[in-house]
Image: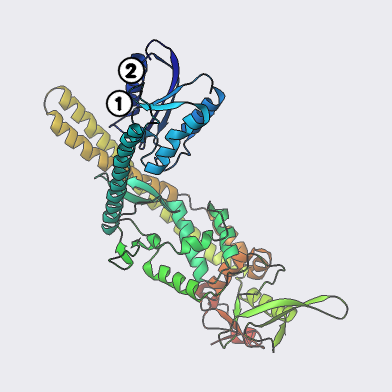
Amino acid sequence: MKNSHHFAIGYARISIKDQSSYSLLYQEYAIKRYCEQNNLTLVAFFRDDGESSDTFNRPNWKALEEFIQKHKDLVQFLVVAELDRFSRDLIKASQKIDEPYQKYKVRVVAVSESISQDTSSSSSFLVRGIKLLVANNELILIRSRTANAILQAKESGRFTHHAPFGYRNKKDRSGLPILEVVAKEAEIVRLIFQQYIAGVPFFLIYEEARNQGFNRTGHNSIQHVLEIIVYAGFIRISKSASQPERLIKGVHQSIISLSMFNSAQDLLKRRHKPIASKHKQIIPLRGLLRCPCGAAISGSYSGGRNRRTYLYYFRSKERTYNFPGDTLHLMFNKILKQLSFTPADFDLIRNKVVTWLREYRKNQSTQIKMCVDRIKAINQKISYLQIALVNGVISTSIYNRAYADCGLDKAHWEAVTNILMKEQYLKVETLNRAGEMMMGLNEFFATCGEAEKFKLMKLIFPESLEFDGKLFLTSAIHPALAVNYRKDLFQDLLTLK
């Protein structure tokens, strides 16, 4: 064999990136040495770094197959460090080892095998089968150890998978996995739970969440968020042959309370069918009103004799009583108009808030100056430590401990400064925009989107709003607006129960 000259390609694979044992570098060295010893010209080399043995859907394995197909008349050998670099799965590896020869007459050899070995012989088949069987057994052991390690991590309150929306995967000081809250995403998760519990339909929650930065897609993306117990600070361990499903208190920070999560689960269980993804026609008060009996009030358009359509509201459990949409809209518009602030009321509020803001900003400036002074003092202390180290006054170990303490202290005061700086930017313009809404609640309701309608209704009438066929009824009005409620102005419109 050494008197003839042949061409070969090499293949190396490791399952974990930067894996130290049985590294790509070692495999490449072994393959090149084998080719030199056996008079093989290595024309190409393919490496899969961090690719699992479970599948052959590996980028460079595909490139290797394309190369063999393109140069089938040139290449005679495919050299690997060990046969389990194909796969640790006995059946998959056996198939892939035979495939190059069956298709292109390219023989697969490991560096531990003779170049002249007859790979089609029964003895060769037996030896290779034993090696792959050992590798397959090792794979099973690795999977078992991994599963046990994951279970142990879960039982200690650690989340071991890809972080859900609202968190990111991190390592704690011990190098163990932990979830870190992503503040902006966490706010969106809270919004989703709050709106769902408030009765907002899925499609409106999704629309609002997307506007805020929610990047998950799919028809069930909102429901999927609602079903993740991790947000409440717990880890779910699936049932096994020996134990039922369990919940373990997680070491990560929760985003919502357990009671909020349980409320969402109760609603999900009671929901018999998915909420419609979109409304065909705009019905402003649909889903916002209830009958005193507890039934929801829905609405739809009906055709008239003159081919015009008319909006009617009705109890969701029956269609016996229909309430004309125009009448309800007119009454509701008057209620919001009467509850709105007058310009004089809002001027009084704005003056008080502006006065408070001035004092608040003055206090914030004082606190920011104190934080900046603390940071300067820490930097000065670090400079003294460096001088002391250079002059031999303190040892390296003492310097390192003191420097680490200073670093932690400095990071704390820098974080406090950043928070105070952000809070400084409360603007009167924001208050003025809110005032425009509060002085024209009826106009804002008429022009805002459906998700905003739900939120506005929940704010104004925290205990829900009912309609008995003649009057609107509620148990409470937001305290800021309740001062505008007088029986003589609302006697034909709204009654406080």
Q: Residue at x 68, y 64 (%)?
A: 447
Q: Is residue 227 above or below residue 470?
A: above
Q: SS of the residue at dot 1? A: loop
How far across and how far down the image is residue 477, in percent?
53, 78
In depth, the one of 345 and 479 nearer the eye is 479
How far across and how far down the image is residue 240, in percent?
32, 64
Hey, what amino acid is under mark 1? Ser
Write down the residue under mark 1.
112
**For residue 192, side relative to residue 239 (left or right):** right
**For residue 308, side relative to residue 30 (left or right):** right
Residue positioned most to the right = 306
Q: Assess disc 2: are there few (<14), some (14-19) or many (≥20) residues with their C-alpha within 10 Å of its C-alpha.
A: few
Disc assigned to residue 160: none
Write down the residue under mark 2.
33
Specify the quadrant of the image occupied by residue 212: bottom right
**Type of colouring:** rainbow
Q: Assess disc 1: are there few (<14), some (14-19) or many (≥20) residues with their C-alpha within 10 Å of its C-alpha.
A: few
In front of the other: label 1 or label 2? 1
Which comes sooner in the sequence, label 1 or label 2?
A: 2
Q: Is residue 42 above or below residue 165?
A: above
How far across and how far down the image is residue 400, in percent?
18, 33
Q: Residue at x 39, y 38 (%)?
A: 87
Specify the quadrant of the image occupied by residue 21: top left
Residue 191, visible in the rendered structure: no
Q: Is residue 362 above or below residue 394?
A: below
